[in-house]
Amino acid sequence: MGFSKKQLFNTTQNQVANYTKVLGHPARVAMIQHISEHKNCNCNELVKSTGLSQPTISQHLVEIRKIGLLKQKVKGKNLFYTIDTNQLNECRRVVNDFFVKTQVNCSK
């Protein structure tokens, strides 16, 4: 197995990078916004709202789920998504803390 450069950085640096990577794609931002506005939406709804293909939506959902931002429920053969508000708050806190600390450091 190869060496991961993530090991060179601390937990917070990796968290900020992971969160901002997910938020760094406009399709994912649009999907997160849509899910927050339409609780329990499925992939087909996201296809309609974004105009992206179903496989593309599925790939983006995988990336969003990796950071724990989505909860999913199975109803029949469909998966329905909602935002995990606890994880949303954690993401917001980590990214906000990064910017606040960076700003304080710039002021020194």
Image (spheres, rainbow, N blue to C red):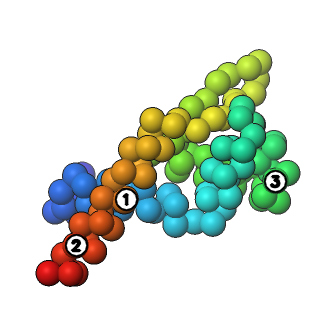
Q: Is residue 4 visible?
A: no
Disc sitting over residue 33 in the figure = none
The secondary element bearing badge 3 is classed as: helix
Q: Residue at x 36, y 51 (%)?
A: 93
Type of amino acid under label 1: Val
Q: Measured along the vertical axis of the image, is residue 31 above or below residue 89?
A: below
- Residue type, label 3: Ser
Q: Which residue is mark 1?
A: 95
Badge 2 is on which residue?
Answer: 104
Alpha-carbon distance for marks 1 and 3? 27 Å
The residue that mark 3 highlights is 49
Among the two numbered marks 2 and 1 on one chain, the one whose residue lies closer to the N terminus:
1
* Structural crowding at the residue carrying mark 1, measured as other residues with C-alpha within 10 Å and reported as few (<14), some (14–19) or many (≥20): some
Residue 75 location (% of width, % of height): 74, 20
Left/right placement of residue 22 relative to residue 41 reads left
Residue under the image location 85 percent in, 51 percent down: 48
Q: Amino acid at mark 2?
A: Val
Tag count: 3
Horizontal side of 95 relative to 41 (left or right) equals left
Give SS at disc 2: helix
Specify whether 33 is left or right of 78. Answer: left
Mark 2 in CB contact with mark 1 (< 8 angstroms): no
Mark 1 or mark 3: whose residue is earlier in sequence: 3
Q: What percent of the width, then of the height, locates residue 55?
A: 71, 50
Q: Which numbered disc, 1 or 3, marks the residue closer to the eye? A: 1
**Image quarter hosting the C terminus:** bottom left
Q: Secondary structure at mark 1?
A: helix
Considering every residue shown, the one lying at the far top of the view is 76
- Are circles 3 and 2 on residues that touch, CB within 8 Å? no
Residue 80: which quarter of the image?
Answer: top right
